[in-house]
Amino acid sequence: MFSDVEIPGRVFLDEVDLVVEAADMMTILAAQRLERIDAMRQEALREATCNGRVLTEVVERGIRLELAAALRITEHAAGDLLAFADALVHSYPAVLESMGRARMSERHAEILVAAMNEVEPEFREQILDRGLALAEAEPVGTFRRKLRRLVDQVRSATLTERYERATAKRRVAVEPDDDGMGWLHVYAPMVAIHAAHSRATAIAKAVTSGDADTRTLDQARADAVLDLLVDGSVETHPDQARGVRATVFVTVPVLALLHDSDSSRAAAGIEPPVVEGIGPIPLPVARELAGGASGWTRVLTHPETGMVLSVGRDQYRPPPSLQKLVKWRADRCMAPGCGMPASRCDVDHNVDWALGGRTELTNLGPLCEGHHTVRHHTDWTIEQLPGSGGAILWTAPSGRRYRVDPERAVPVFRPMVSADAPF
């Protein structure tokens, strides 16, 4: 989670306050514009009815044309505005009200409405209020991810059924392009696609690690995929590129494995299994992965939380198991609003090692290359909040502070207390 923290003792307005004030005004005006766009459409439809016209696509086209001409935009853009205004005014008035009070931006509203329109009608009531709260609390990137997760969780009761229908459509297609090139499209389960891309990337990095290979990562990755598909082997690759396997994180709530189906799991209020960078997967797929498939990092979560893992000052670089736990806990770069997957981030000592920082879970967090540079070479500062489970507090040069919470709590397993043991 990402949220503002007030600056203690500050009573004056600075330039950032003025920017925020202007942005809020723009959001309020955007809400009013959408209300007026819908009112204009309704009035045009009433006039068309009074003039004896049948309300056909031609009438709607005339309305789009007038709006486009008045705003000096394309008819396509005018159509999007009309549809968005209609959805807010007539289907999601609470979202419009929130915009009108500058509690969420217009972009938040667009994302929320698009997500609501995509889900089945029976799920919308379960999503709207929680989605609204997320939109009012989170920056756009974090909101989009959390809303997607919320939608997936609500729809997870039917996940296996939908997954089986979708996998029946798997296929490979070739699309020709110019200059003797073309595209190879593979439509298949995202878990397998993700793993295949991960393996191709690992091979590409291995073969381009020397100075003699001048290929870009994209070029080497494409070559690796073709080598594997055409020749069935990578014998032309150096030794370090052979035997490379994909590594994918799959998180399975341990209680989920006790249920026979996704519907019974959902009825018990237990979250679905998820794969990093993909989202929920059906229970049968999760059981297969959690049962020992090679190349997968499995994390079985427990309902209780709280754990400390540390190597103290004994070594600077976190051991692989600790790095994996740090990245799994955060899921993303721990900078405000950043969406870079943790698997592509550096593990940062929140208190620098050179300044006495310890190599432990309570002093580590993933940062992407860009935010890692900002953290060390600007006046931004960070600290991990004690007892927060990994939340990081960023302090900007202006003095404003922003809290970023990790996506997951670290599991802990406590020994059972015997019935005759004292409490």
Image (cartoon, helix red, strand yellow):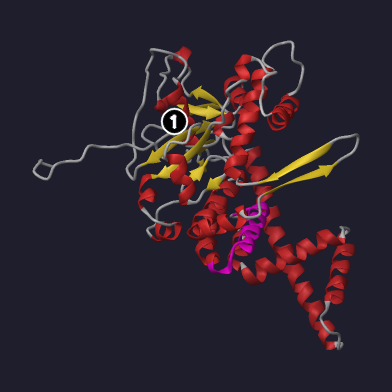
Left or right relative to 280: residue 107: right
Residue at 60% across, 38% down: 194
Characterize the magenta stretch by its predominant secondary structure.
Answer: helix
Q: Nearer the viewer, residue 17 or 83?
A: 83
Q: Position of residue 385 (x, y in %)?
A: 42, 32
Instruction: Give the quarter of the image for residue 181.
Output: top right
Instruction: Give the quarter of the image for residue 239.
Output: top right
Q: Residues within 10 Å of mark 1 (few under 14, many from 20)?
A: some
Q: Position of residue 382 (x, y in %)?
A: 50, 28
Residue at 52% across, 56% down: 159
Q: Is residue 306 above or below residue 113?
A: above
User: Which quadrant would the C terminus be assigned to in this image?
Assistant: top left
Residue at 67% across, 52% down: 107
Q: Amino acid at mark 1?
A: Leu
Q: Nearer the viewer, residue 130 or 321?
A: 321
Task: Look at the image and give the residue range highlighted in magenta.
Answer: 104-122
Q: Is residue 161 magenta?
A: no
